Every structure is written in C-alpha cells, then in structure tokens.
Image (tube, helix red, strand yellow):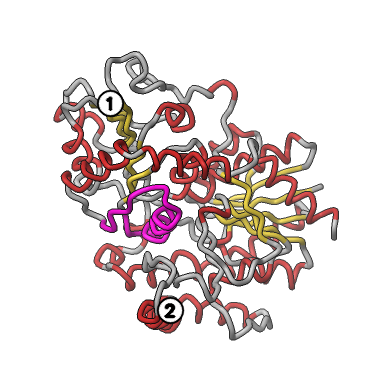
Amino acid sequence: MNILFASQAIDGHFNPMTGVAKELQERGHDVRWYTGPVLAGKLRELGIPLFPFKRAIEHRADNLSELYPERAKLKGPRAIGFDGEKIFASNISNFFEDIRELDQAFPFDVLVADSSMFIHRLVVHLMGKRVVAFVAIPNMESDPLVPPLFFGFLPARNAREKVLQAAAGLLSDKVILRPASQSYRRQHAFYGQEVPKRGRLTDEPYRCSDAVIQTGSRSLDFPRRKENPNVHYVGALLPYRLTDTSAMQLEPHMDPQGSAGTGFARTVVVTQGTVDNLDPNKLIIPAIEALKDTDTIVMVATAGRGTAELRERYPQANIQIHDYIDFAAVFDHTDVFVTNGGFGGVQLALSKGVPLVVSGINEGKNDVNARVEYAGAGINLRTDNPSAESIGKAVNSILADPAWKERAQQMGRDFGSDNPAEAAAEVVEAVFSNR
C-alpha cells in the first residue's frame, strides 16, 4: 500500500506522526511524507522520502514573527483568530494543489493528514482518496457537552455556566474563527465544494475523514453526548527513536533516574515547551525559585534556550538544567511534572502515571490544562505567569497527597496500548482494507 503522510512543518505536529509512519513502513508499506523542507534532515534519518512544500508557505515555530511581524502585538482571541486564518486556513489550496500534483509521481492509496491542514474534504471528494486525520491536540470535535475551544473552560455545571459557555461559543464562531472559516469556505467554493453550514471549522477533519487517529486517551477528554465511531484514541504517540540515538544523547551529569541514589527525596521535571519559551520568567524561573535549595531534584528542559545562563544563575546542587531531557526515561522516576501544557508532554507524563502542575494559556494550552484539571490528574494554575509561591504550593500539595499519584497512575492504565504507534497503524490499514 502507498501511504502519504502530510503535516505542518511544526515539531508538535510532525513528531507524534513519525512513530506511526515508521511502524507502517516496517510492515512493508511504501511510506512518503509531504511537509516543509526544514524537516528534510529528520526524514532522511528516518529513511522516509520527502515531498517538500512547493506552493504552500512553510510555517515554523521559529519563523512566524518574520512572516507576520504584526502577530507579536496580538493577544487573546485576536491572536487565535489571526493564527487560524494565516497559519492554518490560508494554505489549504496550496496544500491541495501540491498533493494533487505529487499524486502523479506517487499515486497514494491513503493519506494520513495532520488535522490542522484542513485538506481532508478536498482530498476525499475531489481525488477519491481514503483519508485518515491525525489529531495531535485534544479532541476538538464540537459536542453539546464540550466547552468551546480557546477559553480553558471545564464542562458547565449549572445554568449560569451554560449561558456563559454558549456566549463564548458564539464569540468563537462569529468572531475568533470567522476569518478562518470564511477563508475555508471561499477556497472550497473555488473547487465547487459546499461546506455544511452547521458545525465549526474544527469539526471538518472529523466529518470528512474515513478515520481519525486521536492522540491521548478517552479519559483525558471531556464527556460527550455523541461519540464519533470514526475516532480512535491510541494513547501517547512519541517521536520515533532511532536505535543508535535511543539514549537521546544524555549529558554526562544527567541521571535519568532522577533522585534515585542521590540523597534527594523526590524528582520534579520542568519544561516551558518548544514554542512559548523565549521568556523563562513565565514558568522556568519561578519553578526553580520555588524549589531551589530543597530536598527535591529539579530537572529543567530549556529546549536549547538560555541553558548556560540559567546554569550560571542557579548553581544549587538540586537544580539540573539541560537543553533537552529524555522524558520517556526520566518520567519513570518523576514525582511531579511542571509544564505549560504541551499536549505531547502531558500525555507522556500521564501514560507514565506522573501527576502534573500545569500553567499555560497560549496556543490552546488552556484547553489541555482544563482537561488535566477535569481528569483530577493535576493542579491547573490557570495563568501564563505563575508565581514561585503558587508553583511551590501546588507541587507540595501533590507530593503530600498520594491521591494525586493514584489518579495519574489510573490514567496511565487508561492509556491502554503499550504500543500506540502499532494501534494507529492498524487504524490506517483498516481504512484501506475496508475501502
């Protein structure tokens, strides 16, 4: 079977798909990838041929300010609306024309498409292809019981909250997502494709695909009145790890076993993610301030930003600051994970039974963190700029009450499959076999 993967050129979208692609390749399928040329090196290492963007704009975490200088001035709903139109909706026709052209060189049987590309309807209807949507963020399909996106709401518990969330949903549909939705409809109208009036733009990958690979577990989603039978929760999908780099190049002074055998009582891991990490004062520094000079090892991942400066500023014996951390290894010995709410890290921590302290709002982090709070698997500080005091209090609360750990471990069991990439590959194969 010929399988084409397609993704944004953004690590958080690309990386979780790599394990699935390699699993399918190892099963004997011809797997190729359509994405930005910036990922050529990674795909070369994986042994997967690249079809680079031709018409499509390559949006990356490190070039958005250069492409859109005005973006830096936007906050809240205006920022979300801008990203929805410029980064996601504007590229749809370019993606589609690139894919239609490359189909001549590689006539694919199934497309596994990053849900944020929004090309599913065109590929299914105009090319007659089987399409599997890949969702690297929480389930974004609308439902009467699920709060609207972007606000970090928990499910409504009373009439007042229902009214508030209904109003927020209208704001999301009519204001925040309107430019993106209008762009989506215009581009589909050009191809003679009518888009249903009911539902939201973010419903489209769920409506138009033959199946949906949903990262995470059902227990990390909100209750739903209507279950979509095409949605398959497959667990915490990790980036594929080459056998010769399985240790992730751990630094000599970095022990993946954390506090084990060190004389320290506990291990706390801290990250501010790979996108919103320009200013360590948001989360990294207050977390270190909260926990320095304690009986807890604090392992900080900077994603390569300001590591040397932070090491010089915090020479305490219990503070370990690294560019990158092998989370998969470290979480086996971690007591609390402090994060801004990146969905990949949240899933991995919970799959390992690690409770969380979450604090982030941008890039949909508040919706991820609301799910952590609702699941009872961590404490949500509900801010982009938590104080050292609030972080310390939250960490100590989790360490003092074993119920947090027990709940996280229960969720780890809920994640199910020991091999999420294998479960996802079976979804793709089933779509082809049931054509």
The residue at 34%/34% (across/down) is 269
Examine the structure image and report whether residue 363 is included in the region drawn in magenta. Answer: yes
Task: Say which mark, if any, is on residue 169.
Answer: 2
Circle 1 sits in a helix, a strand or a loop, which is it? Answer: strand
Q: Where, by quadrant of the figure, is residue 258 drawn? A: top left
- Vertical placement of 252 versus 335: above or below? above
Q: How would you rate the neighbour count of disc 1 (Cα within 10 Å): few for under 14, some for 14-19, many for 20 or more?
A: many
- Vertical placement of 257 versus 279: above or below? above
The residue at 30%/52% (across/down) is 359
Examine the structure image and report whether residue 12 is included in the region drawn in magenta. Answer: no
- Report x, y in % for residue 313: 14, 30
Q: How would you rate the neighbour count of disc 2 (Cα within 10 Å): few for under 14, some for 14-19, many for 20 or more?
A: some
Q: Is residue 180 visible?
A: yes
Horizontal side, residue 102 vs residue 366: left or right: right
Q: Amino acid at mark 1?
A: Ile
Quarter that holds the C terminus: bottom right
Q: Is residue 175 visible?
A: no
Q: Amino acid at mark 2?
A: Gly
The answer to which of 399 and 136 lies nearer the viewer is 399
The residue at 34%/64% (across/down) is 68
Q: Where, by quadrant of the figure, is residue 320 drawn? A: top left
- Report x, y in % for residue 275: 36, 49
Q: Earlier in the sequence, mark 2 or mark 1?
A: 2
- Report x, y in % for residue 397: 27, 42
Task: Say which mark, if any, is on residue 297.
Answer: 1
- Vertical placement of 145 versus 259: above or below? below
Magenta span = 360-383
The residue at 16%/45% (across/down) is 389
Horizontal side, residue 416 vs residue 25: left or right: left
Circle 2 sits in a helix, a strand or a loop, which is it? Answer: helix
